[in-house]
Image (tube, coloured by chain):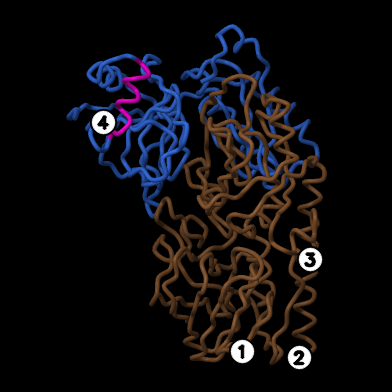
Amino acid sequence: MIEILSRTLLSSVQDLGREGYLHLGVGTSGAMDHVALAAGNILLGNPENSASIEIQIFPFEVRFLDDIAFALTGADANAELDGRPIPAWWTLQARKGQVLKLNLTRRGARSYLALAGGIDVPLVLDSRSTQLRGQFGGLDGRHLQRGDVLRTIPREDSGNTPTPLPAAGFGVEPPEFALPLGDTEAVAQGIRTFVRVLPATEYDCYEDASLAAFWNKDWAITPHSDRYGYRLEGEALATKRTLEQRSHGIVPGVIQVPPSGQPIIQLRDAQPSGGYPKIGTVIEADIWRLAQAKLCTQLRFVQTTYAEAVSALDETRKYLDKLRRLATLYKLSKR
Amino acid sequence: MTNAPHSELSEAPPRASLLGTTALLFEPPGEMDIHTQRRIWWLARQVETWPDIKETVPGMSNLMLVFATPPRDPDSLIANLIETWNHAEELHLEGRIVELPVIYGGEQGPHLADVVAHTGLTVEEIVRIHSEPLYTVFALGSHPGYCYLGGMDPRIATPRRKVPVRNLPGGAVSIGGAQTGVSASPGPSGWNTIGHTDMVFFDPLRTPPALLAPGDMIRFRAERIIK
């Protein structure tokens, strides 16, 4: 068990999301950064889809009420266990009573705290993710608060044999280094994020000048950006004629353009349907990059092809497979 | 609803577009009416049995397919989809009728004035026109339990708002373009809210979780008008 010590705005329990209920209006929810969530679970030997805590506002503090192995992935938040610094993308054994603190982030926007066994909240419609709009899933369908106590699923039940961790723990290479994209200098400084985009349904309806701006200009991530969507600001995008769509299904990554001309990227808590024109879709393999882009930084769209977008998913899979092999090796070397 | 004249719509070929590697949106030509929608329901039932399709999501006279794994050859999937659509039959779903009492206008119907301004009709006329028809649930979407309804009188059609409202309460009765609907829980919306109703549309622990399903029907009863 762990206890939330900080007044923790906007932290929630998430797994990889709730699939198969879009036809009832139920969006997927789930971790904004699927790669970080899966990686944390892999480091601990959990099933990849185990529920963890997504942390969006720092500092964040928890106390371990038992001896529990944990992993930190996603944004590097200068974490400390009882004041002792912990590197990013690291797993460690915590002792009962120890306090884990995540400070301001050096890099990235969202950290993930995974616990051995995974967080034990009820499965609702096949997922443990918090559905904020529907007010269910996660812990009572809401954000976490100070004083909340979360249990973990006993290892016997999760189908994994517990393996002791090396005393100092171990870590892995974060995906921003393993899977670089765009101007790595700007990415490393956290000033600009690059994501690959496939043109979507109404792409051809935009003025040439707007398409040029879409691909070549910076897009500021405004402070009104959250798990629902990133509201961007840049040169207003104009269509050649007025468009009004019939309501239709959409998925995370779709870039909608309301009549203001300022695009909105739909994300994990977005509605599963919409009616604004869709200029493009951030490919599934790059949504984790968006998840780690901070407010008030710049975004660049990189045009890609369907075939490239599919192989990008394979690249992510290979990265996670490599982590799994490394995690196995570290644990074997302990004995 | 598109501004294109009817003839242009009918002649257009079905449109299929990829939403990244996650989904495909299929938009056949034709009116946004019950006949097109029944064919969409039929198509959804066919396609959901296809390999590598995780889910089919009917919209307003369109269908989104969500991939279990992205198809290596989306063009052949699209060809199969169009072929199946061309043979689509009307699936008749016999639903039940649910009556929703509505308070129009006031604090919980803040955009009624915008509908007045856009349509040139009076508040009474808008309420009468809105509460007259028996609406059919065409599809669910937007948020858990929300219903897209068919059958709104085009005279009260009003464009979606330029900037979406960030937090509307549950039970908001609204108009977006040529469509109307009721929000099932608090959240953001780009539609014009004209009134309010009290009803629980979704409970994840209930089977089925949604109160209404495609084919069910709704009637709005004007309980009160606040000017």
What's the distance in space between the residues labelled 3 and 4, CA to CA? 57 Å
Magenta residue check for A75: no
Chain identifier matching the brown colour in the rendered picture:
A
Q: Which residue is mark 3?
A: A177
Q: Which residue is mark 4?
A: B99
- Answer with the quarter of the image where residue B15 lies: top right
Magenta residue check for B110: yes
Estimate how packed mark 2 is, as few (under 14), some (14 to 19) or many (20 or more) residues with alpha carbons within 10 Å.
few
Residues at discs 3 and 4 both on one chain: no
Q: Amino acid at mark 1?
A: Arg
The secondary element bearing badge 3 is classed as helix
Q: Nearer the viewer, residue B155 or A332?
A: B155
Chain identifier matching the blue colour in the rendered picture:
B
Q: Which mark is residue A84?
A: 1
| Closer to viewer: mark 2 or mark 3 | 3
Estimate how packed mark 3 is, as few (under 14), some (14 to 19) or many (20 or more) residues with alpha carbons within 10 Å.
few
Q: Which residues are magenta?
A: B109-119
Q: Chain of mark 4?
A: B
Q: Which residue is mark 2?
A: A334
Q: Do residues under tags 2 and 4 come within 8 Å of each other at their CB atoms? A: no
